[in-house]
Amino acid sequence: MKKNPFDNLPEVSKEDAFKLLAKPNDQLELSSDYYKAVFHLYKYPGLDTEKVLLNLLESNSQEPSILIAKRKAIEVLARHGCVNAIPIIGSFLDSSDPYLVENAAWALQELNCKDSSLIQAISNLLSDPNQNRRVLIQALSNLGSISDLPSLKLLLDDLSLHPGIRGASIAAVRKLSGGCNQIKELEDFLKLPNQNDRQCAVNDVINSGDISLLSSVLRTPVAPSFRMKALYNLWPQNQNKIYNLDLINTIDSLIKDNPNHLELLDEHEENQEDKFLVECLLNTDFRRAYLSLKHLSTRNPEYLWGILSIQLARMKRDYGALYFLMILFRSVDGWNEDALSEIKALTFSCLEDDWPDFMKFRPVAILTAMKLFPSIAIRYISKWLDESMTPFWACRYATLLKLDSLLRIAENRVIIQNISIGKKDTHRFVREKAKKLELDMLLR
């Protein structure tokens, strides 16, 4: 597992994690040591790790440090697929700590729990407003609890519910029954001003399985990973066109991520100073960042670089800003030599191996490298198309997306060889893109 360069926490070995969890609470150097130990044990699945985490869950201590570590332990056991932990995880559905209850319900869903008594215990919690009912509803839905349909439909009668709870209920009813009269409400939730609410709405559309809402999801200003997840989960196998959407054109647009193709809800950034717009590229609300990107991409490059260069050091430390910078660099023509030198260094630093494989800026960095620095990018094509070296499918797709732009500096033979690699890819979207490229070359 690669370490995130933004993560400055010290590494903890499995042995050291075990030692920390064996210490009495009054001997801890930091109250967070138990949590830290459990967090790092995610990297070390195995029977010994399972035993240590189960021992932690069996502790009767009500110390806050123990309770917080237990929440994480439940998550880690679920992610490790430890079905032996189902009984003890299920016991936390009776906890007075709503966060432990939430994690327990989520974990039972992840472990595909078949214990009807535990599923009923989750259902019984729906009437408790102190619980995270969104998580409870999702658990019941994913566990296929048809018997809970009446309770879920009853929730839909309460129009005062938060969109996150209501959206989860709509998705669950649609998934379990095959239909829901309120399904179009999810489309309205995709336009809510709060980003977390929009992200929840995207996940609700995915959980509902309603393909008709996919085009609306693809226009929603949230992180691209949410839209990629929706496209992958909702697009039917072996179909290239649905609801007036073409698969390849849709994925191309998603990978390029042009802000003009998103429904940005308002234009309040339009009259703001460009310095403010640049700072908005650091905003955690992607809608605001996309709005700024839309306006900044129309600016004169000389003028724009003067503003960007001042903020560049700060933006290099923010992976959201790096994502938007990669799109901005590619969207503006006419950068001067000094700017291009900085842009080149930053672009290829985003593609270095010390980053985690699935960083959102990696696919757009490939597009930027291939457009602005093709003679350098061509050296990396085979690496970017190699699944063992480039696990993130979107990176491999991005490479194919700009591959034909290299025809002027590469032989047809080289391009064809790389298309052939793409045709053998394990990801269906990458394979479809390679097939389309091959057909386009034959028709030239």
Image (cartoon, rainbow, N blue to C red):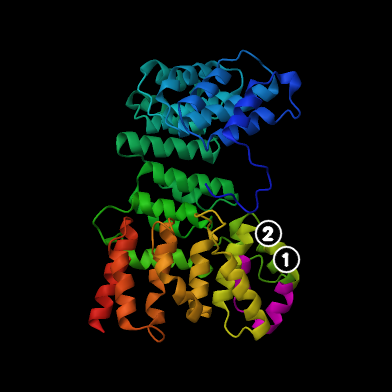
Instruction: Tell me: residue 180, above or below residue 241.
Output: above
Q: Secondary structure at mark 1?
A: helix
Q: Amino acid at mark 1?
A: Ala
SS for callout 2: loop
Q: Which mark is residue 317?
A: 2
Query: Where residue 139 appears, x then y in whole percent?
Result: 43, 30
Quick check: marks 1 and 2 in contact, CB under 8 Å? yes
Residue drawn where x is 69% and y is 25% of the image: 65
The part of the chain drawn in magenta is 290-309
Residue 369 x/y as whole percent: 52, 74
- In the rendered image of this protein, does residue 155 appear above or below residue 224? above
Q: Nearer the viewer, residue 79 or 269?
A: 79
- Which amino acid does the dot numbered 2 rest on? Arg
Does the magenta-highlighted stretch encompass residue 347?
no
Nearer-the-camera pick, 191 or 295:
295
Q: CA distance from mark 1 to mark 2?
A: 7 Å
Q: Which mark is residue 362?
A: none
State the residue in front, 195 or 8: 8
Residue 437 image point, x, y percent:
30, 73
For image coordinates 35% across by 47% down, the residue present is 210
Which quadrant of the view contains residue 415? bottom left
Q: Is residue 294 magenta?
A: yes
Quadrant in the picture for the C terminus:
bottom left
Helix, strand or loop: magenta stretch: helix
At 41% from the left and 85% from the top, the residue drawn is 409
Q: Quadrant of residue 299?
A: bottom right
Question: Does the image show residue 56?
Answer: yes
Within 10 Å of disc 2 (Cα), the crowding (few <14, some 14-19, many 20+) is few
**In the image, residue 86 lies at what x, y percent?**
43, 21
Q: Which residue is mark 1?
A: 313
Mark 1 is surrounded, within 10 Å at the Cα level, by few (under 14), some (14 to 19) or many (20 or more) other residues, namely few
Q: Is residue 327 above or below residue 216?
A: below
